[in-house]
Image: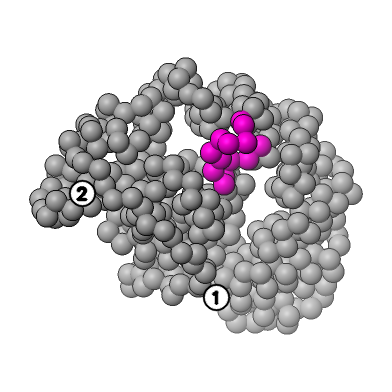
Amino acid sequence: MRRLLLLSLGLSTLLPAAPLAAQREKVPNRPRLTAAADTNSAHAYFQHGITILEQQPHQAADAFYWAARIDPTWADPLYARRIALMMSDSRRLEGYMEGNRRIINSPTVRQIDSLQFRALTLNPFLYRRLDRQLFKYYIRSSIKREESLQGGAGRTDDVLLEHLIENWLNGASPSMRAWSAYSNGRFPDALRYYASALKGSRNKSDIHADRARLFFMTGKTDSARVSMTQAVEQMRKKDDDALVYFYESKALYEHSIGMIHEERNEPDAAREAYSRALQEDLSYYPAHARLAALALAAGDTATAQSEMELAVQIRSDDAGLRYNYGLMLVMARKLDEAAEQARKAIETEPYYARPYNLLGRILEGQGKPQEAIAQYREYLRRASRDDAQRNWTTERIGILGGQP
């Protein structure tokens, strides 16, 4: 891809990507928001990250990190953080985009890609609107690196860079044009380009999967089901030497098929898809969570609890999962067990507000008003200004004889 890009732009070969040392994850400081911003709002941190992504990808990654901690059930910050981390190292990005297996399979990049996989497990049909921005950043950094090698750094201004990028995209392969159109919101164009890309592609699973997501997003659920089924079939046909990215997974594709069937009100077919996902990967806990939801909707509380217990055993550090399990146990009137799940959710992610509210309700139901008030106050300390439970919680504290 790089050779085609450089020939299109009239530039010579760039330096190869440098080796990447493994980096250990560390907790970043919270970015400073404006005085009027709600520092308990995941959306505030997310929007801050979007605003500074182009110029300060390192700081944007920190903002997305905190958005994901404040709301661990929201897929977008995880996906956006992957984009920001890829943009924060231009040489790593170049190697990744050019299919350098050493970089793609390195521990650091696999950790970065795991963010996208995690995001897709939360929302298999996540709209990856930042993909085009990532690609344009890659082209821009490649051009600037070549200028530096030629002793003319800074000669190409941003307007000319945009022109070069658009020219390259207009002459790119159908799959690349589809990717660009998709992330730019031009879904009909993207579907047309993906259809052309299928004719000349050897590994078609990711193309079928992207087409399925587009069909789903445009309400064409039957076409989405067919395309995602083809993605699974193509994944099974890939040879051992084929390049597979961390976030490509047959279990994830089967999860997607299950969600399509749920959207079509076909619970039996959805259950079959989630069961197939577990056959592909026994550790794929989102399938257990979806099976639990289907069982609960059918009135089978025993199966619902069994499936959720399996899910939290597999992924014990998922605060959103434990919160949902706690809600399910409250519905089953198992307050002691529900309280345990709420406490574990809080222990797992202390910045996530809703488990505090849930625990307060449980304690109130157990006849422990003072303990309930304490948890309600902890919730109010962490909840965003527009959280739907704030007013109710404040009222409950007053009714119980406390002050917010």
Q: Give the residue type that dot 1 points to.
A: Arg
User: What segment is highlighted magenta in the picture?
Assistant: 238-250
Q: Can residue 243 be found in the magenta stretch? A: yes
* Left or right: residue 150 compared with residue 390: left
The figure's colour scheme reads one colour
- Kindly report the distance in space between the C-alpha atoms of the residues bearing marks 2 and 1: 51 Å
Visible residue check, residue 119: no
Find residue 146 and name its label: 2
| Mark 1: few/some/many CA within 10 Å (<14, 14-19, 20+) | some
* Left or right: residue 378 compared with residue 312: left
What residue is rendered at 10% in x and 53% in y?
Answer: 152
Q: Give the residue type that dot 2 points to.
A: Glu
Overall secondary structure of the magenta section: loop
Q: Quadrant of the C terminus?
A: bottom right
Residue position marked by numbered label 1 in the rendering: 381
Q: Can residue 253 be found in the magenta stretch? A: no
